[in-house]
Each structure stands twice: as structure tokens, then as C-alpha cells.
Amino acid sequence: MKTLLPGSTLGILGGGQLGRYLALAARRMGYKTGVLDPAPRGPAAQVCDFHVRAPVEDEAAALELAKRSDVLTLEWELIPSPLLRAVSAKKPVFPDARVLEIIQDRLVQKEFLGKEGFPQARFKSAASAAELSAAVADIGYPSILKRRRAGYDGKGQSALGGEQDLPAALELVSAPCVLEEKIDFEREISVVLARDQKGNVEFFPIAHNEHKNGILRLSSAPAPISETRAREARDLAAAAAQALGHVGVMAIEMFVAKGGALLINEIAPRVHNSGHYTMGACAVSQFEQHLRAGLGLPLAETWLLSPVVMANLLGDLWTAGAPRWEPLLHNPRARLYLYGKDAPRPGRKMGHFLLLGGDVESLRTEADQILRRMGTPPGR
Ligand SMILES: Nc1ncnc2c1ncn2[C@@H]1O[C@H](COP(=O)(O)OP(=O)(O)O)[C@@H](O)[C@H]1O
Ligand SMILES: [Mg+2]
């Protein structure tokens, strides 16, 4: 295994906020960075040494990035795998194309996890209208239909509470889907871990995730779960990373079902929104830890330095112009992270903030208050 030292160049496939913070972590440590992204000045391109301006599906452009890099990683798991294989023939890439091929397709991912014996919600392939009716007959209601490819932030999903929801579901199966049982969960958590090239694993403290309309709203740590449950979650997550042969950071989203059973929801083979709290509240951030794994450096300690809540700032806050910043910036325990995106849209992640100190319960209430006040026009 070759160790890449400061002065080497990291190439990043994909130029959003995850790429931005990977690049900033690399820069801080004295590495050079380049990014492949179609936008003229996206979140990552703003902070990289060089920018190959093309879509992440453009193989020639990806090879150009590879030519100018010593090692490559990605911020998005939907990079076409033939492109990733072509790039890995030239330069080391982490994670491996094999991992992506399993993760990219929800059905393949679920079948892989099932074969390996991991607990998850019951599911059935629904690649056509006929398969959908068979799947509904088997799984029943309530259930959730999800596109197999390219879903994120709850996009490409349709909830089925009963027959009245079948027309919407039929529209969704115009592309292959998977139908899964709806879990009546107590809470959602994620285990963010890093696995290095030798197979060593380090865990970040488990995060408690709260979604609204399928989009992560708040993430907090430490999660309010027992040590036994936390150990079980870490064991499942590490076994999944091991089974995949993953290198780098990986986020494993889980449901804690009523009664306490853990079920894997989905896996992201990369840095993740629910790990943003680590940048500011842990001894090492998920971004540096990801780089360490891929650069051949030992993984760092992940101590939680303070209880923390991360709140996403969605484009909805921009509908009447910029949000009110004072409630956030005048709070001495709040840290702002803005992604440098110039086109706010409802549901689009524009930034996030961390709130530190005290206990998680009061931090969640306080984060809610800040969000409310940021969206309230001045004078009200
Ligand atoms: N089977 C399920 N049961 C209950 N809630 C679910 C289920 N699948 C998804 N959800 C809810 O929708 C959110 C987004 O779904 P997810 O599968 O994680 O897709 P995405 O790729 O959009 O994150 C989850 O975090 C959870 O809140
Ligand atoms: Mg998810």
C-alpha cells in the first residue's frame, strides 16, 4: 500500500458540498485538489486548485482529471461504473467500482444485504406494472415504492397507504422500482464509519436523524440509544463495510423499529449529510477521515468533543430573499456552513449549521427556534 503525502493531488468526481469539504480537508493538510463538475463555479470548484468542467458521466473528462491526479475519490455514488473502471485502470480510486455497482441499484444492494444475512425491511422487485401488483400482494400496505436508481432526498419514491395510491405508484414504475414494507420506526440513526485499506475500522458516534418529506432536517449526536443497541449498530455497519470490501467513509442508515430491532435502510459509500456534525464536533471530520483511508494514512480518533445538533438549511428559507442570519450568527454556540450555491430552490441543500454544548434535547429545541426565526421576516 502506497502512502500519499502532502503535495500529492486528490481528484474528486462530483462538485457539490461533499466535494467542497473533501477538498477543504485536503487543502488544510497540504494536498492539491481537482474536481470534475459541469457547473462553472460549483461548491467544490470554488475551493479546488483546478477544475475539469464536464458532467461526471463524461469519461474523457474523468480521464483528464485522473491524468492530473495521484488518487481519486467521489462524492456521489451514481458515477457510471464503466467510467470508474476506466479511471481505476489509470490511477487508484476509492471506493472501488465493485462497491458502487452493488450500492447504485437499490435492488442489487438489498439482495446483497439479504444474501449476507443483514436485517432489513421486506422488499420485492417492481420492475413493471405486473411485478408491482405481485409485490403489493406480497408486501401489502403500508409500503413504499422506490426507484432502483438515482433516488436521493426522498426523490423517486411513492408511499402506498392503500389502493388509492396505486395510480401514482404505476407512474413511478415506468422505471424499475423496488417495493418495501413501511417500517413503523422508533427513530432513524446512522453509523458513519471509515474503513482503511488494511481493513481497520473507526466509528463516529452514532447520529440520530430526523427527516421531513424525505429530506434530512436534523441530525444529532450522541443518539439517544442504549450502549447495547449502539454496539449492535456498529457491529452491523462494520460487517456491511467488510462484506463490501469498502475503503473510505461509509454511512449506514438504519431504522430502530418499535421494540428495538435494527434494520438497515440504505448504505452510502461516501461522506454523508448525517456525518456533517463531525466537522466541528469531533476530533477528526468525516472528510479528513475519508481522505486518510484512501491516502494510506492511519485512521484518526473520532472523539465527540461536545453534544451537537446539525440542521440543514434548505432553499425554502430563501423564498423571500436571504434568510435572517442574526438568530444564527449571533448565537455563540452556532457554526454556519454555506455551500456557495447561487440558485436556492425549495428542498435544495444550501448549507447547514451546527449547534454545540449543553444536552442534545435542548439543542434540538434551540435549533428549531433558530430555523423558525431565520425564516421570519424582520419586524414580525
Ligand atoms: N421502509 C421504510 N419505512 C419507513 N420509512 C421509510 C422507509 N424507507 C424510507 N423511509 C423514509 O424516507 C426517508 C428517505 O428514504 P431513503 O430510502 O433513505 O432514500 P433517500 O435515498 O432519498 O435518502 C428515510 O430516511 C425514511 O425517513
Ligand atoms: Mg436515505
Image: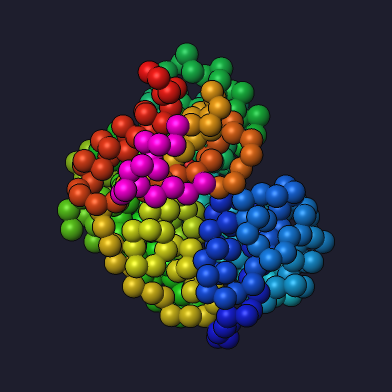
Whether residue 41 appears in magenta in the rendering, the answer is no
Measured as percent of width and height from the top left, residue 200 is found at: 40, 76
* Residue 330 seen by the camera: yes
Q: Residue furthest bottom?
A: 2
Tell which of 63 and 43 is nearer to you. 43
Q: Which residues are magenta?
A: 324-338
Measured as percent of width and height from the top left, residue 173 is found at: 61, 30
In the image, is 374 to the left or to the right of 67? left
Whether residue 335 appears in magenta in the rendering, the answer is yes
In the image, is 173 to the left or to the right of 38? left
**Residue drawn at (64%, 35%), measured in percent from left and top?**
343
Q: Quadrant of the C terminus?
A: top left
Q: Quadrant of the N terminus?
A: bottom right
In this figure, what is the number of numbered marks?
A: 0
Q: Residue furthest right?
A: 60
* Residue 110 seen by the camera: no
**Residue drawn at (63%, 59%), measured in percent from left and top?**
47
Residue 97's quadrant in the figure? bottom right
Q: Which color scheme does this rendered protein use?
A: rainbow
Measured as percent of width and height from the top left, residue 145 is found at: 50, 32
**Residue drawn at (53%, 40%), measured in percent from left and top?**
349
Residue 187's quadrant in the figure? top left
Measured as percent of width and height from the top left, residue 133 is found at: 52, 25
Up-down: is 347 above or below 192?
Answer: above
**Residue drawn at (58%, 80%), measured in percent from left and top?**
6
